Image (tube, rainbow, N blue to C red):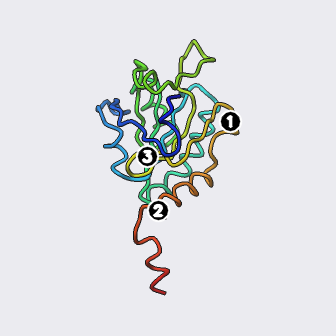
């Protein structure tokens, strides 16, 4: 993983194809919102299936809290779209089947030469795409819990929203 992908660094504004076949910049997808960016191995991985089900349960909360979830895979758009639909996800899935961005970020999982998937990292991004938190999910227990994601997103809002404490101050 490149050194910039640490808390305080900025996640690059990569250009990739989404699950619907549209070419999108990451900044266009996150729309200057706090976001969870999850790089995943592929639809075939049982660890990913389990983690994605938890993200699906979390998506309603993220949506009403003006936050985004974005998933990134080497699966082609049509496979990502089928996986997305199959689990009931509503967020954007970005595809990197030529592994160009994966190579730029040095995020190829070295132990799977057959699929050559992304290392399963989760990044919590501030509205400017600076990285607030990083979770290495190579081993399943390294993945963030939904409470850890909530806490990370809450801290971003506390820092970036000037009116965060306005209601408390008015009382």
> Residue reaching furthest bottom?
171
Label 1 belongs to which residue? 140
For marks 3 and 2 on the same chain, the one whose residue lies earlier in the sequence: 3
Task: Identify the residue at image location x=56%, y=56%.
Answer: 150
Q: Is residue 123 rendered to the left or right of residue 161?
A: right
Q: Nearer the viewer, residue 38 or 108?
A: 108
Which mark is in front, 1 or 2? 2
Residues under numbered marks 1 and 2 in contact, where contact means CB atoms less than 8 Å apart: no
Question: How many angstroms separate mark 3 from mark 2 (CA)?
Answer: 13 Å
Horizontal relation, residue 139 to residue 20: left or right: right
Q: Quadrant of residue 136?
A: top right
CB under 8 Å between discs 1 and 3:
no
Residue that label 3 marks = 130
Q: Earlier in the sequence, mark 1 or mark 3?
A: 3
Element marked by disc 2: helix
Residue 149 badge: none
Residue 122 picture location, percent across and down: 55, 40
Q: Nearer the viewer, residue 72 or 13?
A: 13
What residue is disc 2 on? 159
């Amino acid at each position: 993983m490149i050194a910039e992908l640490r808390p305080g660094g900025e996640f690059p504004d990569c250009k990739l194809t989404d699950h619907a076949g549209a070419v999108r910049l990451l900044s266009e997808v996150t729309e200057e919102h706090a976001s969870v960016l999850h790089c995943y191995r592929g639809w075939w991985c049982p660890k990913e299936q389990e983690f994605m089900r938890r993200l699906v349960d979390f998506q309603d909360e993220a949506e009403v809290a003006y936050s985004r979830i974005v998933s990134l895979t080497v699966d082609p758009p049509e496979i990502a779209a089928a996986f997305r639909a199959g689990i009931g996800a509503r967020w954007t899935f970005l595809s990197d089947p030529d592994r160009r961005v994966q190579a730029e970020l040095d995020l190829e999982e070295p132990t799977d030469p057959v699929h050559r998937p992304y290392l399963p990292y989760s990044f919590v991004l501030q509205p400017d795409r600076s990285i607030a938190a990083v979770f290495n999910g190579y081993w399943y227990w390294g993945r963030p819990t939904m409470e850890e994601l909530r806490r990370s997103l809450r801290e971003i809002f506390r820092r970036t929203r000037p009116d965060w404490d306005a209601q408390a101050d008015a009382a």
